[in-house]
Image (cartoon, grey):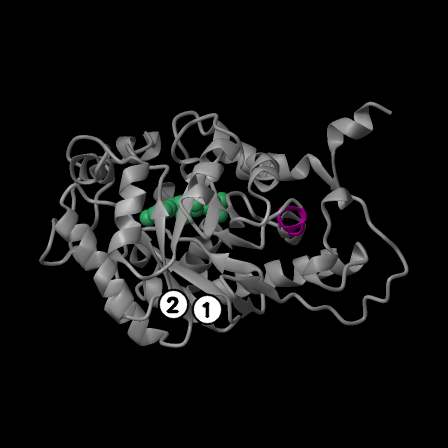
């Protein structure tokens, strides 16, 4: 479990992601007839019944034998969105076959060898994935001390299924974290905004950027015609002491307005966290670790249970704050605790 739960270096950011939500207060409105609630949101022009999707997490068959397939099937039951990691232990094609009608996005890491990258994108297109999510916060790999200490390796019965036959599809951690060595030797650390343009040029799918934390970068993305951004700090696993995703969201929302859709991941643990992210400008949130915890406890049923708990808590937060639809959830309903300290 160390691999799932760890953050970068001193783990400050991992803790911040959660505590930043707790510093925000929801101002409730009363007497609004909340007997009927509608949690539908709109994402990339499509109606999505629930604003809670699943973030890409690598190697889900470490958590349970069915791995990615169990995870996406649980998402299918909610009608929401699943993002498949480049570093999955089930292939793009097998995931697509198991959930043909689910909204699926493919998360991309750009390999130094652009033929490998192009191959992944083309396969995702062919398999019916509806967007490419380019992770931009992993130019080099965050130092995760737990993985270094454990010499994190992929067990021999598993492989990075998308890379079979085209790139190394396994790694061992003989000298520190094997994953860190894999990423640092094969992923391209020279990436710039020119590579985003290159990616836009090789695919007809929308390119979403995951890992933006500043208004400055969000504006560059908007200027490039990027339709959506996932405001994310990689679950606190990359730059230690960078802002919590929820802290970064307001400046980004203010800067881009309606030019890009915004989603958020990082530290979503309660329904009220989802409410706060939506109030501050996100159209949708994603969860990484909570889904993997569900997988490791009870496979597909475990993820279903996690999503059910989050949905019920979110609906309760809507009802108790007087909101019957997503558009009722407004920014002025959220106050930072410091405001109350001034009274
Ligand atoms: C075990 C683990 C593996 C991850 N693998 C990937 C990955 O392959 N690609 C990626 O873009 N992000 C990856 N992430 C980051 C997640 O997509 C997401 O940003 C993060 O988990 C959200 O925070 P949360 O776990 O608090 O929900 C990973 C995170 C974890 C915990």
In the picture of the structure, the residue carrying the numbered disc 1 is 74
Q: Quadrant of residue 235?
A: top left
Q: Quadrant of residue 206?
A: bottom left
Residue drawn at x 33%, y 29% is 145
- Kindly give the residue lying farthest to the right in the view shown: 31
Question: Does the residue at mark 2 contact the one at mark 1 (Cβ under 8 Å)?
Answer: yes
- The reply, left or right, for residue 304 in relation to residue 198 is right
Asked whether 25 falls inside the magenta stretch, the response is no
Above or below: residue 251 compared with residue 171: above
Q: Quadrant of residue 248?
A: top right
**Stretch in magenta:** 275-279
Q: CA distance from mark 2 to mark 1?
A: 6 Å
In the picture of the structure, the residue carrying the numbered disc 2 is 70
Identify the element where label 1 is drawn.
helix
- The reply, left or right, for residue 162 in relation to residue 108 is left
Above or below: residue 152 compared with residue 91: above
Which residue is at the front of the view, 162 or 279?
A: 279
Q: Position of residue 256 (x, y in %)?
A: 55, 42
Instruction: Name the magenta segment's main secondary structure.
Output: helix
Which residue is at the front of the view, 76 or 263?
A: 263
Q: Position of residue 166 (x, y in %)?
A: 10, 55
Tell me the crowding category of disc 2: few under 14, some 14 to 19, or many 20 or more residues within 10 angstroms, Cα based. many
- The reply, left or right, for residue 23 in relation to residue 71 is right
């Amino acid at each position: 479990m160390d691999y799932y739960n760890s953050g970068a270096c001193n783990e400050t950011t991992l803790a911040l992601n959660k505590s930043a939500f707790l510093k925000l207060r929801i101002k409730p409105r009363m007497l609004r007839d909340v007997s009927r609630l509608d949690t539908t949101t709109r994402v990339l022009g499509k109606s999505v019944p629930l604003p809670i999707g699943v973030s890409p997490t690598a190697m889900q068959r470490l958590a349970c034998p069915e791995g990615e397939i169990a995870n996406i099937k649980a998402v299918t039951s909610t009608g929401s969105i699943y993002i498949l990691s480049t570093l999955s232990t089930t292939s793009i094609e097998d995931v697509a076959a198991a959930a043909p009608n689910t909204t699926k996005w493919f998360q991309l890491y750009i390999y130094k060898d652009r033929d490998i990258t192009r191959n992944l994108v083309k396969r995702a297109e062919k398999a019916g994935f509806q967007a490419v999510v380019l992770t931009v916060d992993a130019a080099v790999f965050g130092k995760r001390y737990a993985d270094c200490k454990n010499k994190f390796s992929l067990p021999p019965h598993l492989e990075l299924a998308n890379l079979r036959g085209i790139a190394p599809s396994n790694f061992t951690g003989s000298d520190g974290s094997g994953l860190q060595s894999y990423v640092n030797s094969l992923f391209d650390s020279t990436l710039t905004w020119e590579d985003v343009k290159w990616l836009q040029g090789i695919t007809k799918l929308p390119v979403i950027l995951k890992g933006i934390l500043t208004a400055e970068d969000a504006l560059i993305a908007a200027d490039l015609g990027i339709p959506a951004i996932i405001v994310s700090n990689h679950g606190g696993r990359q730059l230690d002491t960078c802002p919590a995703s929820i802290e970064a969201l307001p400046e980004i929302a203010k800067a881009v307005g309606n030019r890009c859709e915004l989603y958020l991941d990082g530290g979503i643990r309660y329904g009220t966290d989802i409410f706060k992210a939506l109030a501050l400008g996100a159209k949708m949130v994603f969860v990484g670790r909570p889904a993997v915890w569900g997988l490791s406890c009870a496979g597909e049923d475990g993820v279903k249970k996690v999503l059910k708990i989050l949905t019920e808590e979110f609906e309760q937060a809507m009802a108790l704050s007087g909101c019957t639809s997503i558009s009722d959830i407004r920014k002025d309903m959220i106050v930072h605790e410091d405001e109350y300290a001034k009274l």
